[in-house]
Amino acid sequence: MAATNPEYYTHSSGHKISRIQTSGFDDDIIHIGDTSVNKYELMAAFGGTLNPGLAPPPSRKFANPSPLGLCAFALTTFVLSLVNIRARHATNPSVVIGLAYFYGGFIQLLAGMWEIVVENTFPAVALSSYGGFWLSWAAINTDSFGIVSSYTTTDELEDVLGYYLMGWVIFTTLLVSVTLRSTFAFFGLFFTLDMTFLFLAIEKLARSPACGKIAGWWGLAAAFFAWYNAYAGLATPENSYIVVKPLYMPGAMLPRDKTKDDESK
């Protein structure tokens, strides 16, 4: 171990020069006077990018991928929900298939993967899962996959689709339960989405077109909640005159105000 009182030597210029000592396993800690540094820190400083594993940190920080994923979810849900409520007598959802593949599916899945990179577990699970939902929905509705045509009866197809949607009801209910101490807008998004899946499942299992329309209205609410949350993540005092202030659920853990912390010091 390093000495507690290192010896000092005086240079001809009058400055004190301290003895360099090492300690720790494999002498990985260097003591220069009263200062202690890890050996790898010095290696990183002088080795640069030529030392594998000791490269300097990246010069750029990752942006917030949540607004991208929320917008992808919102637009795809919005269009399908308009079809579900039979807006202007629309009944064919084929246009939504393209959105489900490339925007609600692929783009949202990418946003979920980027959430993993920035260490946000909840949005990573939510965005990636719903990106997978839209990709699977598109595959079911794509004739070349042969999924629908593989069923010999309509009743069997409707039942299995009902089971498929009930699985998403269970999953979304789990997500709702972990938004109870967040914001009203965030809770509202997952609650309305849960209701959307629930009524879609009932439509299939009970053969109830009315429940399909109800699901469409819930889906429209979920889409607007998603856009609202996306806007809250995009708008700042620097780029907009309209900045969303969070309205927290009862018992929510409020983020610490750094300004007040600084003023109290």
Image (cartoon, rainbow, N blue to C red):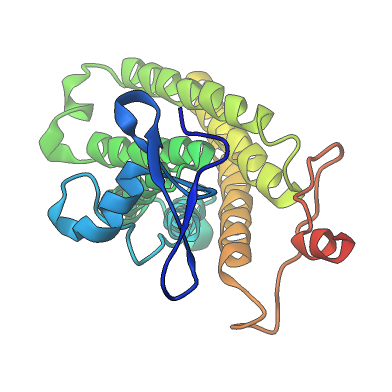
Q: Is residue 196 above or below residue 59?
A: above
Residue 228 placement (x, y as % from top left)? 63, 61
* Front residue of 179 and 64: 64
In the picture, residue 213 is in which quadrant?
A: top right
Q: Quadrant of the C terminus?
A: bottom right
Q: Quadrant of the N terminus?
A: top left
Residue positioned 74% across, 48% down in the render: 183
Residue 237 placement (x, y as % from top left)? 67, 80
Q: How many marks?
A: 0
* Front residue of 22 and 258: 22
In the picture, residue 173 is in which quadrant?
A: top right
Q: Is residue 134 above or below residue 194?
A: below
Please give left or right for residue 259 compared with residue 173 in the image. right
Please give left or right for residue 204 compared with residue 194 in the image. left
Q: Is residue 98 visible?
A: no
Q: Is residue 115 visible?
A: yes
Residue positioned 61% across, 58% down in the render: 229
Please give left or right for residue 7 compared with residue 180 in the image. left
Residue 190 placement (x, y as % from top left)? 62, 40
